[in-house]
Amino acid sequence: MAASKLVEITSILEDIRKQFVALSERVARLEQGQVSGAPQAPAVPVAGLAAASLKQSQISEEELLAVSAALAAYLGVRVHIRQIRLIGSHAWAQEGRVSIQASHRLNT
């Protein structure tokens, strides 16, 4: 009985290895933009943003398109981004630390 389980585990591991290799190859093709048959997201227009404003805000065009595509996927409609501002605030980090510390039980 132990030998049959060992064979079964070996078979499962081999299947996982094959899937891992296939996924690794697919990721490599995705990174190179060579995936055939994959649905391409439509280009999302970005209105009201000039190249000069992109350089000032330090947001690349690729990042802007990624944000626009994410919003379009979330909302289900094309979006027109009017403004993106980078906020240099530590409030989110502080709030996260407060939340984590509050979740810990203190012995008093």
Image (spheres, rainbow, N blue to C red):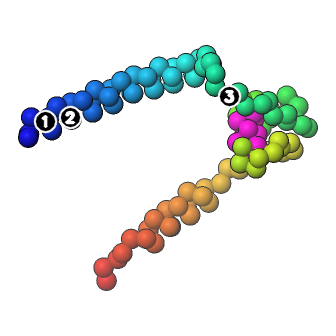
> In this rendering, is residue 56 above or below 107?
above
Name the N-terminal-most of marks 2 and 3: 2
The image quarter containing residue 33 is: top right
* Front-lying residue, 104 or 8: 8
Give the x, y percent position of residue 50. 88, 31
Name the N-terminal-most of marks 1 and 3: 1
The magenta region covers 64-72
Q: Which residue is mark 2?
A: 8
Secondary structure under the numbered disc 3 in the rendered image: loop
Q: CA distance from mark 2 to mark 1?
A: 6 Å
Q: Amino acid at mark 1?
A: Ser
Secondary structure under the numbered disc 2 in the rendered image: helix
Is mark 2 in CB contact (under 8 Å) with mark 1?
yes
- The residue at the far right in this view is 48
Give the x, y percent position of residue 78. 82, 41
Q: Is residue 59 visible?
A: no
Q: Which mark is residue 39?
A: 3
> In this rendering, is residue 73 above or below 63?
below
Residue drawn at x 56%, y 64% as measured from the top left: 95
Q: Amino acid at mark 3?
A: Pro
The image quarter containing residue 9 is: top left
Give the x, y percent position of residue 81. 84, 43
Q: Which residue is mark 1?
A: 4
